[in-house]
Image (cartoon, grey):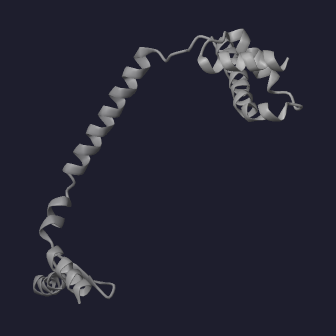
Amino acid sequence: MKTDIRHLLDKYFEGDSSAEEEKVLRRYFTRDNLPEELRVYASLFRFLDDEAAALAVLDEIRSENTAPVHRKPLFLTKLRILAAAAASLLIAILLLTRPDRQSSLNESYVWVDGKQITDPATVRKYAEASFGKVQSESDIIEDQLRFMLE
């Protein structure tokens, strides 16, 4: 049997083996009592055997799963699209024509210590103070480079 398996191994690695010969090799290498010199090939053929079994199960599942797919009627799909478009349009109209929208655009306010301040001069003062604290991106990079080079 050893010479037969060795001959089949040679054919397999040369690419000349048939599918039936490869099945024989897979079955042979799933045994527990393998000769020491052939154990190196056991993991390869066990993997191939596991893969063949998994493919057989997958083919069986595919053959069983041939039930027809039920699709929704085209009318319902079009109706849903139309309803979504109408709802989007209605929301856009409501957002654009809010009566208080124009008044809130002209008003400036700032929150300080939990109180809303609407005085334009005070709002301007806080805005200028906030803008003065903002560093440009190039200033930040220069500061980081200076720190690294020191």
* Quadrant of the rendered image containing residue 81: top left
- Is 71 placed left or right of 24 in the picture? left
* Quadrant of the rendered image containing residue 31: top right
- Is 114 placed left or right of 33 in the picture? left
Q: Residue at x 59, y 16 (%)?
A: 15
- Is 36 placed left or right of 119 in the picture? right
Q: Nearer the viewer, residue 107 or 100?
A: 107
Q: Nearer the viewer, residue 68 or 76?
A: 68
Residue 80 is situated, as x and y percent measured from the top left of the image, at: 40, 27
Residue 120 is situated, as x and y percent measured from the top left of the image, at: 11, 82
Looking at the picture, does residue 15 appear above or below residue 120?
above
Residue 136 appears in the picture as rendered: yes
Looking at the picture, does residue 7 appear above or below residue 93?
above
The C terminus sits in image quarter: bottom left
- Is 74 placed left or right of 100 in the picture? right
The N terminus sits in image quarter: top right
Residue 138 is situated, as x and y percent measured from the top left of the image, at: 15, 75
Residue 117 appears in the picture as rendered: no
Q: Residue at x 29, y 44 (%)?
A: 91
Furthest-front residue in this view: 3
Total numbered circles: 0
* Quadrant of the rendered image containing residue 109: bottom left
Q: Residue at x 76, y 21 (%)?
A: 26
